[in-house]
Image (spheres, rainbow, N blue to C red):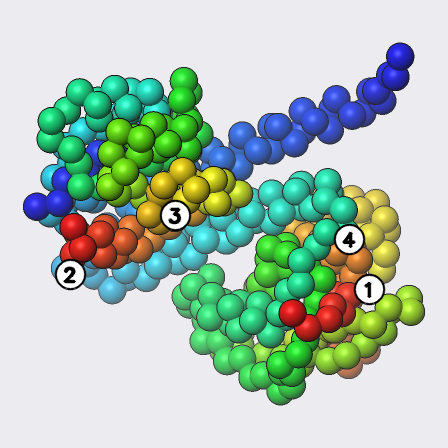
Amino acid sequence: MTESHPTQGTEKLSAFFMDLLSHDILNNNQAVLSYLELVLADPDLNAKARDYAEKAISHVRTSTVLVEHAKSLMAARTVDPNSFRLTDLMRSVMLAIKELPGFFPAKKIKVRVVQGPTDAYVLGDALADDLVLNTFIDMVRADPGDEVAIDVRVIKSERSGKMCWSLVISDTNAILQPGMRSEDISALLSQDNSKMVKMAGFIFARIGAHLLGGEFDAKELATGTGQGGEFALTLVKAGKP
Amino acid sequence: MTSVLIVDDEMFIVELYRDILQLRGYRVMGTAFDGEEALRKYSKSDDKPDVIIMDHRMPVMNGVDATKEIMRLNPRQKVIFVSADVLVEKEARDAGAVDFLPKPFRMDDLIEKMEKISRFH
């Protein structure tokens, strides 16, 4: 008779609970989003109330993205990396650039694609799209200014003998928290939770990239100054479709 | 006026769709809180809705099964599937849904899909 490990039951229960919880949160987000849209549809709404409602919508969107991240990670944990599909990294980048302003209605965001090859195919799936969007969101969050300028490069790289594509995004005004700078996942997860602020998206990027066989790095643009940030999402290169 | 049947197990979601669709000039001809209730109401009614807005996760009978049964009764019925579970999209389309919206969605997106269906109805 094969005995299952006691943690298997707990993991199954966690996944089940996560599934139910995310479903209910998304339903509630639907209601909040739609009622706010109704408020915004009022032509007599004053500018201040309109501003508040738009900000509230952006927070609903962020909450939805966080739930989707958690769902993606739960799903990716059980998937064989060999079954990941081919993903066009530049398509994911352009999709993220289009969606980005909706998360930050109070900021003016300028994205410059410095290097965007047309053959940047990686192994991934919907999780890769989520990771790319998350990388952009984290960078805008790290910039305290109202006007954000981000440079994007998609470049070839090599990690542990594997050919990869790296999405490198940088912002000269970003400020990285000490915990965001490159260190391994276990070191990150051993930190005191109570001190890990604004880190959920960042940890998602780290774990998600790892699940896809890739990596996520963060560094200051000028070492030791705390000024400027660069995020690099590296995913394993795949052949053309 | 385009008529709609709303199927969702969450009362607040049903009320939300009803409020917004009525404001936008649609006739909400009925609501159901699970697939079986939707199927029962659909099969008994002589006045079929132009569009059914169908959730997936519901007690008694889920949205995919309800859609299959409804399509068996009327293969021309238009069903727009809405769900927080994006993994069910293929199943929903295979069951006969003409469109799929992942929750949460913008109401304008739903209205746009409804209008598209109304134009070809």
Tell me the subunit letter for badge 4.
A
Provide the residue designation for mark 4: A82
Please report, as a chain letter, where disc 3 is located.
Answer: B
Residues at marks 4 and 3, common chain?
no
**Residue A162: % across, % down:** 86, 68
Which residue of the protein is positioned furthest toward the top in this rendering? A1
Residue B75 shows up from this direction:
yes
**SS class, disc 3:** strand
Quickly name the residue at label 2. Answer: A43
Question: Label 1: how many residues lie within 10 Å, few (<14), some (14-19) or many (20+)?
Answer: some
* Numbered badge on residue A182: 1
Foreground tag (4 vs 1)? 4
Q: CA distance from mark 2 to mark 1?
A: 49 Å
Q: Residue furthest left?
A: B1
Dot 3 amino acid type: Phe
Apparent side of residue A87 relative to residue A207 in the rendered image (left or right): left
